[in-house]
Image (tube, helix red, strand yellow):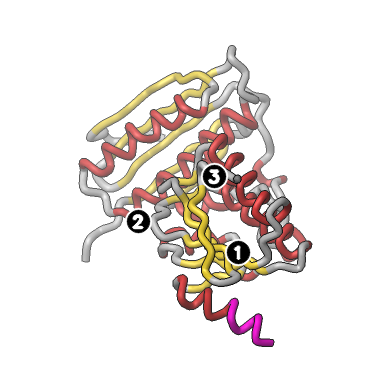
Amino acid sequence: MTLEAPLWSLDRRIASDLAAGRAVQEEVLNVLDAHGWDAGCVFAVRLAFEEAIVNAIKHGNRHAEDKHVHVVAKLLADRLWLQITDEGPGFDPTAVPDCTEDERLEVPCGRGIMLMRSFMCHVEYNDVGNRVVMEKRRAVEE
Amino acid sequence: MNVNRRLNVSEVGDVTVVRFVDRRILDEANIQEMGQELFQLVEEQGKKQILLNFAGVEFLSSAALGKLITLDKRVKSHSGKLILSNIRPEIYEVFKITRLNTTLDIKDDEADALAAFAALQAT
């Protein structure tokens, strides 16, 4: 997919370390704030970004010191485009059980991907399942 | 004496009111610690009526949701009651999307939650 020239972009390879993941998140979120994104959209991006990067570090790379996570972010006029790639074997996102089914409501994990899909406008995994691309459209003021 | 690092705990009558130190409940180590402190209230201190007041909490991740589900189960298994309150709209949306608003008891504010506890005791 070809994107128009971004207003701002970031291309970062980070260690499989949650603090490093959080630092990249803050960098992106600060840029959204600086560009006047509303609090609801910033909340949505924070949530999806957090879930995706934790998945990449914890479930993808399994915290391995010799593996990295590649984060690409592009801020466009009307949306944020995010790509997060880990170096793990990947997974099948369609095989993750629906956490809202009655019998799974009390299971304490498995909600991250559902939240990413709900709070972002677009979420797509590659075939291997080690890369996720997400987009969030900026709210337009009435 | 119990020293809580992630929670501020007070008693209002028979209700244990818990507020959170962190504005953003997302760091894995902090969530583990928060979970341990919450579970201790139930399992070591024998608290039966617990109110989690989320005033001041701006964000929580799915890992934190997992701890709340486990806490609710443990409170129920000790014949207790857990109520959540003061959840800001964006975070309430997280509970709605995951349908946890149907399994967890959520009130608008602390006064509503305390009234619910009082009503339970009256029955």
**Which portion, as a residue range, is magenta?**
B117-123
Secondary structure of the residue carrying tag 3 is loop
- Assign the magenta stretch its main secondary structure: helix
Mark 2 touching mark 3, by CB under 8 A? no
Badge 2 marks a residue whose secondary structure is: helix
Residue position for label 1: B50
CA neighbours of label 3 inside 10 A, class few (<14), some (14 to 19), many (20+):
some
In the image, A135 versus A69, the foreground residue is A69
| Residue A40 circle label | 2
Residue most extreme to the front: B1
Q: Which residue is mark 3?
A: B4
| B79 shown above or below A2 | below
Q: Residues within 10 Å of mark 2 (few under 14, many from 20)?
A: some
User: Where residue A14 sits: x, y (%)?
Assistant: 46, 20
Asked if residue B98 is among those painted magenta in the image, a careful observer would answer: no
Which quarter of the figure has residue B4? top right
Horizontal relation, residue B116 to residue A95: left or right: left
Q: Residue at x 65, y 30 (%)?
A: A90
Inter-mark Cα distance, 2 to 3: 31 Å
The total of numbered circles placed on residues is 3
Residue B79 image position (x, y, % from top left): 76, 68
Chain bearing tag 2 is: A
Image mark 1: chain: B
- Considering only vertical position in the picture, is A124 above or below B118? above
| Residue B86, above or below B33 | below
Position of residue A114 measured from the top left corner of the image (x, y, whole percent): 58, 52
The label nearer to you, 2 versus 3, is 3
Quadrant of the image for the N terminus of chain B? top right
* Amino acid on which disc 2 is placed: Gly
Residue type at numbered disc 1: Ile
Q: Position of residue A87 (x, y in %)?
A: 59, 21
